[in-house]
Image (cartoon, rainbow, N blue to C red):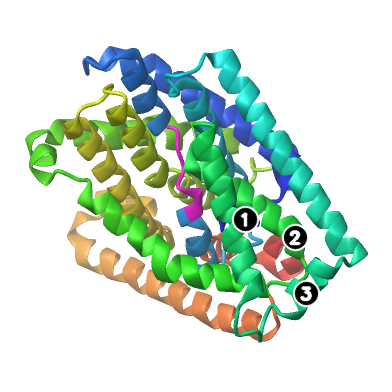
């Protein structure tokens, strides 16, 4: 599902290149810090721990972004570019550094061959769709009403075939799943027939996604996590230091995101710090290779699960916190501590008013077919003249 949402043109654009640079900085920090933590890991275990600090659960983020109507907003564009790079590049690093049976040069050759094969399949599928081949016509004509669900079966067959190929080549399953989504995008057309992907999402979100979370939970030894709370807190802090802070700094440094309001930058940085699926894959690969014990693997998976659980909640509260103007409130309390209760009440009322206006404006925009994120609304609330004079530019 995440591979289907990716637009190669966006990843190859300026923001995509800057996202790759940001990930490289995070990776350099991770590989610099991890050996100095004194964890007693082998080189392979150290590499797995470092890569885990740079990952983004982009596949988990996609439905969250859709539910929060962030698609097409500036926060949404940042999450697409930086989040996708935060999942694709760690997968490539895993394939290069965590395959003990081959040399790095052999791993590069295998990866190159896999990518070439996927590109060939995608291009041929797109040409077949454009020229109206018999198979393509049959799949599109029977996409909705056929009881045998041939299009869904074809999508599942594509996924299973690429997973089998990845297993044969000793590549990570996440890479094969991304490739399957990329090819499916070319088969059905991104702006054309969405019925196939809707059925894939029903199967994925209804069965495989919850099964993955159950599977992840079964692999956690909570006694081991309780025995090492310091490592759990350390890893959570390192996720922020290695991934969120460089990402926030890059949003302030690069021109296309420099003028984003602080609230949007913080929200996007936190979203891209969510990490679970690749941490599960990394710890499994490391434990199979004997490079990481079960206790550390359980701690890392728990940290990733906590990030997926906590960050969406934190970003929701963060929107309310911005509306309450906490810095201004703290300054007023410092100047007039005897009016503490009144100041807090006034700022709470303002936050409630902003939230109500946001919901009213969102309902109006929905009626007009325009979507607006909460971060965009709060940014406009700080600049009412800009919103009134150039509303369409602000929403874009």
**Residue 245, image quadrant:** top left
Which of the two discs, 3 and 2, labels the residue nearer the N terminus?
Answer: 3
Name which residue lies at 73% across and 45% down: 8
Left or right for 11, reference 94 = right
Which of the two discs, 1 and 3, labels the residue nearer the N terminus?
Answer: 3
Residue at disc 3, secondary structure: helix
Question: Could you say where residue 197 lies in the image, as x and y percent from the top left?
Answer: 62, 68
Name which residue lies at 37% across and 26% down: 48
Q: Along the line of sight, which residue is nearer the eye, 304 or 297?
A: 297
* On screen, residue 140 above or below 26: below
Near mark 2 (Cα within 10 A), the count class, few <14, some 14-19 or many ≥20, is: many
Q: Rounded to the nearest whole Å, what is the CA distance between mark 1 and mark 3?
A: 17 Å
Q: Rounded to the nearest whole Å, what is the CA distance between mark 3 and mark 2?
A: 13 Å
Near mark 3 (Cα within 10 A), the count class, few <14, some 14-19 or many ≥20, is: few
Give the residue at mark 1: 158
Q: Which mark is residue 187?
A: 2
Whether residue 83 appears in this view of the structure is no
Q: Which mark is residue 138?
A: 3
The nearer-to-camera label among 1 and 2 is 1
Residue at disc 1, secondary structure: helix
Q: Is residue 363 magenta?
A: no
Q: Where are the magenta residues, as a range?
A: 53-59
Left or right for 78, reference 30 = right
Secondary structure mostly seen in the magenta stretch:
loop
The nearer-to-camera label among 3 and 2 is 3
Name which residue lies at 55% across and 30% down: 92
Question: Could you say where residue 387 lies in the image, as x and y percent from the top left?
Answer: 68, 66
Pointers 1 and 2 in contact (CB under 8 A)?
Answer: yes
Whether residue 294 appears in this view of the structure is yes
């Amino acid at each position: 599902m995440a591979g289907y949402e990716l637009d190669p043109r966006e990843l190859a654009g300026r923001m995509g290149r800057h996202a790759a640079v940001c990930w490289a900085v995070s990776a350099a920090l991770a590989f610099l810090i991890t050996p100095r933590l004194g964890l007693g890991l082998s080189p392979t275990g150290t590499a797995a721990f470092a890569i885990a600090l740079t990952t983004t659960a982009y596949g988990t983020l996609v439905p969250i972004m859709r539910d929060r109507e962030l698609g097409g907003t500036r926060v949404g564009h940042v999450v697409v570019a930086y989040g996708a790079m935060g999942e694709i590049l760690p997968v490539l690093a895993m394939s290069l550094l965590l395959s003990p049976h081959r040399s790095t040069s052999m791993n590069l050759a295998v990866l190159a061959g896999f990518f070439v094969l996927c590109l060939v399949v995608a291009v041929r599928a797109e040409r077949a769709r454009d020229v109206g081949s018999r198979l393509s016509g049959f799949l599109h004509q029977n996409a909705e009403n056929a009881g045998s669900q041939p299009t869904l079966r074809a999508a599942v067959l594509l996924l299973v075939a690429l997973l089998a190929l990845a297993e044969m080549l000793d590549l990570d399953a996440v890479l094969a799943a991304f490739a399957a989504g990329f090819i499916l995008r070319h088969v059905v057309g991104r702006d054309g027939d969405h019925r196939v992907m809707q059925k894939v999402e029903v199967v994925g979100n209804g069965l495989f996604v919850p099964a993955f979370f159950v599977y992840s939970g079964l692999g956690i030894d909570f006694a081991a996590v309780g025995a090492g709370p310091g490592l759990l807190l350390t890893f959570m802090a390192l996720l922020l230091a290695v991934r969120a802070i460089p990402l926030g700094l890059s949003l302030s440094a690069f021109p296309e995101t420099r003028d984003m309001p602080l609230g949007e930058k913080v929200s996007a940085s936190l979203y891209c710090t969510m990490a679970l699926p690749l941490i599960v894959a990394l710890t499994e690969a490391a434990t199979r290779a004997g490079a990481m014990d079960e206790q550390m693997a359980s701690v890392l998976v728990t940290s990733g699960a906590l990030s997926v659980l906590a960050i969406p909640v934190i970003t929701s509260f963060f929107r309310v916190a911005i509306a309450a103007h906490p810095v201004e409130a703290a300054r007023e309390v410092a100047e007039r501590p005897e009016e503490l209760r009144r100041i807090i009440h006034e700022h709470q009322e303002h936050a409630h008013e902003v939230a109500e206006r946001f919901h009213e404006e969102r309902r109006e925009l929905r009626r007009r077919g325009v979507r607006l994120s909460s971060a965009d609304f709060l940014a406009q609330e700080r600049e009412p003249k800009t919103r009134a004079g150039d509303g369409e530019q602000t929403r874009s």
